Amino acid sequence: MAAMVGPWMLLTGCWSDRAPRLAIVAWQCLTVSVVAAVALAGVALLIPTASVSGGLAELLRACAMALSAQYSSPGGAAAAATGAILMTTVLGRLAWCLTVVLADARRRRSRHRTALDLVGTTVPGLDAVVLSADQPAVYCLPGRHRRIVVTSGALRLLTEEQLTLVLRHEQAHARQRHDLVLAWSQTTAKAFPRVPLFATARAESARLVELLADDVAIGHDGNRLALADALLTLSSASAPVAALAAGGSTAGARVRRLINPRRPLGRLGAGLVASAAIGMLLLPVAVAVGPAASATQMDYCPTGTPAAAASMHSTAD
């Protein structure tokens, strides 16, 4: 249900444009919630057949039987095998795809940084590497050895104020590690390509990190129109695959947002969105541990110290 209802809730209205940071968190919570729900469903199917050490007291055996009964399903061993396969497949594929995405991005950035060290130049007072190219472009290579790159074409066309704002935009990407946000959304989309939620989350995350970087660049005293003009200048620029660029395909919509700004999301709206995001994150865990919580409320299932459990067992004898 979350996979179907969640995107509709997050895409309804224009609230995400007014609070991009909160929207990024909400998308992350939604995707984690869906993955966790599937994995925990496999665990729940596996629990009824999980064995307990034979050396435990009869009291604990009775508790284990109660726990098994709470999670029992008509499928028996077949359901347990399905649960084990489901959990292993989901977590294994996710881990593999995350490794591939991170390794590929690291390799691409490393190659580009090596090239920049050879052909790039530094300008005193400019916290960026200057690359000789007619096309105006500004982008960053995130990571531990981050680089912000400005082409000579961008230096020629941008005013000093515009360049400052664009550099702030790229610094926001690098400092806030937006590459990790995008890595997670790319991982889920790659791991489960047939699930529309993850493709939508990937596209929205890429858009929202740009909006957030724009907001950071403007701050409290930035010139929105100057940044909008800079984005128009850089809109046709292309950047390396593993880079985060100030221009690109989202530039037009971002320019409209800068020219016609909306009021930031109020405290009430932000609180509601934050509560919904936390609820999405906790829901699969709550559903998965619900039967276990019911089992611990039974008189013969100890919830205190081992000494208390032994006392209860001797009393029962």
Image (spheres, rainbow, N blue to C red):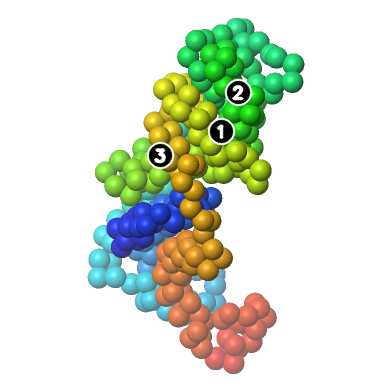
Residue type beneath disc 3: Ala
Question: Is residue 181 found left or right of 83 in the rendered image?
Answer: right
Which residue is identified by label 1?
A: 226
Which residue is identified by label 2?
A: 159
Assess disc 1: are there few (<14), some (14-19) or many (≥20) residues with their C-alpha within 10 Å of its C-alpha.
many
The foreground one among 300 and 286 is: 286
Which residue is identified by label 3?
A: 253
Mark 2–mark 1 CB contact (< 8 Å): yes
- Alpha-carbon distance for marks 2 and 1? 9 Å
Q: Quadrant of the C terminus?
A: bottom right
**Residue at horizontal 51%, vertical 20%?**
137
Assess disc 2: are there few (<14), some (14-19) or many (≥20) residues with their C-alpha within 10 Å of its C-alpha.
some
Assess disc 3: are there few (<14), some (14-19) or many (≥20) residues with their C-alpha within 10 Å of its C-alpha.
few
Secondary structure under tag 3 reads helix
**Residue at horizontal 65%, vertical 84%?**
308
Secondary structure under tag 2 reads loop
The foreground one among 58 and 225 is: 225
Q: Is residue 278 visible?
A: no
